[in-house]
Image (cartoon, helix red, strand yellow):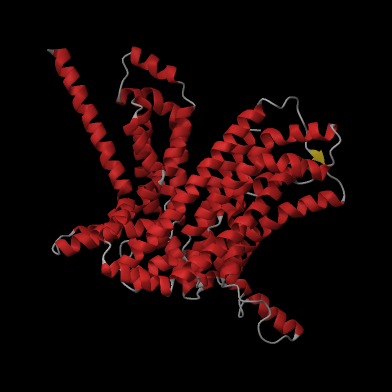
C-alpha cells in the first residue's frame, strides 16, 4: 500500500512538473505566438495597411536597415578581426592590457555612446564652438552626426567586441601553431595571416557578426534619437503614434523573420566553429609563441588596438564627464536616487525570478532529459534574440483582442499599469541569459554525482539542494548578475511597459537626451556604464584564467 501511494505521488509530482514547464514555455512564447496568430486575422483591412506601408514607409525601413546592417557587418568584422589578430598572433608593448581593454565598449550601451558624441560634436557643442572661435570659421564645421552613418559609427565601436571575443578564441586555439608551421615552410607573414589565420577564424567572425547584427536590428535608442527610420522605430511609431496594431504586428513579424534567419546563420557558424576547433585541436603540438613586433610594426599593432577603445569607450566617457563635472551642484540628485532605486528594484526582481526559473529548467532537463524539457529549454533560450519592440507588440496584441471581446476585463490594467507586464517582458528576454550560465555550470558536474546521490537516497528537491546547489553557486550568482545588468540597460520594453512614476536610469537617460538636456543625462548614463563594467570585469578574469 505504501509503495502504491509512493508511486502515485511520484506520478502526480511528475505531472505537475510537466504542466508547469508547459505553462512557463507558453508564457515565454506567447509574444511570438501572438504575432504569428495576427496573420490568421489577415483581412481586407490588414491588406490595405500592408499595401499602404509598401507604398510609403516600408521601402525606407528596409533600405535604411539594410544599409546599416551591411556596413556594420563589414566594419565590425574588420575591427574585430584586426584586434583579435593583433593580441593573439603578435607580441608588442601593452598587449596584455589590450587583451581585456578591448572588451570595455561592451560596458557602454549604444544609445549612451550616441548621446555622448552628439553632445560634444553637434553644432552648439564644445568642439565646434571652440573651432569657430579659434579659427574664425562660420557655420557647421563637422557634418551632422544624427544620420545613418552616425549610427553605423556608434554600432561599429560598441559591437565589435562580439567578433573580437569569438575570433580571439578561435585564433588562440590553433592559429599560432599552424602559422608557426607555415613559417617553417617559408611562407611570409602576410601570407600566413591571409592563408592560415583568416580561414581558421571565418566561422567565428561570422558568428560574431550575426550577434552584432541582431543587436543592431533590435536597437531603438540610437535609431530613435538620430531620427532614423528602421524597423524598430517603425514598430513603435505604428503602435504608439498611429495607433495601428495591424501595422505594428506586420512590421514585428518581418523583423522577427529576419532575426530567425540570423539565428539560423549563427547556429550554422557555431557548428562549423566547433568542428574546426575539434579538428584543429588534434593538429597542433608544441608551444608556439606569438610573433614579436618591434619599431613601426609594434606602433601599428598598438594603434590598431587603441583606436576602437578610444572611440568606443574612452571618448564617450570623457564627453559625458565634461557636463557632469561642470554642473555638479545643479544635478538632480534627489531624482537620481529615485531613478536608481526603481532600476535596482526592477532589475533585482527580474534577476531573481529569471535565475530561479532558469535553475528549474536546467534541473528539469538534467533530471529528466526528453523532448519536453529540451523543447522548453530551447524556447526559453531563444528569448534573448527577440528584440524588445517585438516582445512589447506580442504582449499587447492579445490584450487588444481581449479588450475588444470583453471590455470590462482588468487584465490590461494589471499588465500595463503594474510591474507584472514589465517583469513578464524581462523574463521573455533575459531568462535565456540565466539559462546559458546554468547550463554551463551543469556541464561541469559529472553525471556520476547524480547517480551516487540517488543511491544514497537524495532525489528531486533533495538532489538539487544537497548536491547541485553547492556546485552551482558561482553559476547562479553569475546568472543573476548578468540578468541584473541587462535589465538595468534595457530600454524599449521598459519605455512602454513601466508603471507610471517608475522611471528607470535607462528611460530617463533616453528622455533627457531626447529633450536635448544632455548635461542632465550624463549622470544616469555614466551610472549605466559603471554597472555595465561588472560583467566585463568578470569576463576579463575568466579569459585570463583560461590561458
Q: Position of residue 545 (x, y in %)?
A: 62, 33
The foreground one among 540 and 297 is: 297
Q: Position of residue 298 (x, y in %)?
A: 82, 49
Q: Position of residue 102 (x, y in %)?
A: 65, 50
345 versus 239 height, above or below = above
The foreground one among 6 and 286 is: 286
The foreground one among 415 and 465 is: 415
Residue drawn at the location 45% of the way across and 61% of the way down: 506
Quarter occupied by the N terminus: top left
Q: Is residue 304 visible?
A: yes
517 versus 68 height, above or below = below
Q: Position of residue 352 (x, y in %)?
A: 37, 43
Q: Is residue 88 visible?
A: no
82 versus 38 height, above or below = above
Residue drawn at the location 50% of the way across and 42% of the way down: 267
In screen coordinates, is 500 left or right of 469?
left
Residue drawn at the location 56% of the way across and 42% of the way down: 269
In screen coordinates, is 29 left or right of 401?
right
Quarter occupied by the C terminus: top right
The foreground one among 514 and 71 is: 71
Residue drawn at the location 63% of the way across and 73% of the way down: 121
Amino acid at each position: 500500500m505504501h509503495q502504491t501511494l509512493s508511486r502515485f505521488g511520484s506520478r502526480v509530482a511528475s505531472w505537475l512538473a510537466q504542466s508547469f514547464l508547459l505553462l512557463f514555455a507558453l508564457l515565454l512564447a506567447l509574444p511570438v505566438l501572438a504575432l504569428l496568430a495576427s496573420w490568421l486575422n489577415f483581412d481586407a483591412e490588414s491588406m490595405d495597411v500592408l499595401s499602404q506601408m509598401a507604398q510609403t514607409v516600408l521601402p525606407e525601413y528596409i533600405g535604411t536597415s539594410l544599409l546599416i546592417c551591411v556596413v556594420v557587418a563589414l566594419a565590425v568584422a574588420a575591427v574585430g578581426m584586426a584586434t583579435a589578430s593583433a593580441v593573439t598572433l603578435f607580441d608588442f608593448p601593452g598587449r596584455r592590457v589590450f587583451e581585456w581593454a578591448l572588451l570595455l565598449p561592451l560596458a557602454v550601451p549604444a544609445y549612451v555612446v550616441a548621446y555622448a558624441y552628439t553632445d560634444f560634436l553637434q553644432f552648439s557643442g564644445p568642439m565646434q564652438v571652440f573651432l569657430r572661435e579659434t579659427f574664425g570659421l562660420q557655420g557647421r564645421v563637422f557634418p551632422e552626426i544624427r544620420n545613418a552613418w552616425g549610427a553605423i559609427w556608434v554600432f561599429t565601436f560598441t559591437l565589435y567586441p562580439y567578433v573580437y571575443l569569438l575570433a580571439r578564441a578561435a585564433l588562440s586555439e590553433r592559429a599560432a601553431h599552424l602559422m608557426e608551421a607555415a613559417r617553417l615552410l617559408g611562407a611570409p607573414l602576410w601570407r600566413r595571416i591571409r592563408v592560415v589565420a583568416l580561414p581558421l577564424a571565418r566561422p567565428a567572425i561570422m558568428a560574431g557578426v550575426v550577434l552584432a547584427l541582431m543587436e543592431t536590428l533590435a536597437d531603438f535608442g540610437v535609431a530613435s534619437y538620430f531620427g532614423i527610420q528602421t524597423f524598430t522605430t517603425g514598430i513603435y511609431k505604428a503602435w504608439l503614434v498611429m495607433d495601428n496594431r495591424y501595422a505594428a504586428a506586420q512590421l514585428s513579424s518581418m523583423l522577427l523573420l529576419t532575426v530567425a534567419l540570423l539565428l539560423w546563420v549563427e547556429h550554422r557558424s557555431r557548428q562549423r566553429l566547433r568542428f574546426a576547433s575539434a579538428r584543429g585541436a588534434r593538429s597542433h603540438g608544441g608551444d608556439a609563441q606569438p610573433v614579436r613586433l618591434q619599431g613601426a610594426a609594434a606602433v601599428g599593432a598598438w594603434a590598431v588596438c587603441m583606436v576602437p577603445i578610444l572611440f568606443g569607450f574612452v571618448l564617450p566617457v570623457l564627453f559625458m564627464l565634461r557636463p557632469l563635472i561642470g554642473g555638479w551642484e545643479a544635478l538632480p540628485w534627489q531624482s537620481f536616487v529615485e531613478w536608481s532605486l526603481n532600476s535596482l528594484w526592477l532589475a533585482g526582481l527580474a534577476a531573481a525570478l529569471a535565475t530561479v526559473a532558469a535553475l528549474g529548467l536546467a534541473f528539469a532537463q538534467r533530471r529528466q532529459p526528453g523532448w519536453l524539457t529540451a523543447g522548453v529549454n530551447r524556447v526559453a533560450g531563444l528569448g534573448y534574440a527577440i528584440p524588445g519592440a517585438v516582445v512589447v507588440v506580442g504582449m499587447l496584441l492579445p490584450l487588444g483582442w481581449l479588450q475588444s471581446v470583453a471590455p470590462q476585463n482588468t487584465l490590461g490594467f494589471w499588465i500595463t499599469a503594474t510591474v507584472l507586464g514589465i517583469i513578464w517582458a524581462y523574463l521573455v528576454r533575459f531568462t535565456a541569459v540565466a539559462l546559458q550560465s546554468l547550463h554551463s555550470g551543469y556541464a561541469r558536474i559529472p553525471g556520476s554525482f547524480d547517480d551516487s546521490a540517488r543511491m544514497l537516497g537524495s532525489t528531486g528537491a533533495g538532489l538539487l539542494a544537497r548536491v547541485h546547489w553547492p556546485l552551482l553557486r558561482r553559476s547562479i550568482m553569475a546568472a543573476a548578475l548578468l540578468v541584473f545588468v541587462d535589465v538595468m540597460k534595457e530600454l524599449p520594453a521598459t519605455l512602454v511597459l513601466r508603471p507610471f512614476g517608475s522611471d528607470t536610469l535607462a528611460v530617463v537617460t533616453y528622455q533627457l537626451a531626447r529633450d536635448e538636456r544632455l548635461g542632465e543625462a550624463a549622470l544616469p548614463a555614466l551610472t549605466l556604464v559603471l554597472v555595465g563594467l561588472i560583467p566585463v570585469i568578470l569576463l576579463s578574469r575568466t579569459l585570463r584564467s583560461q590561458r
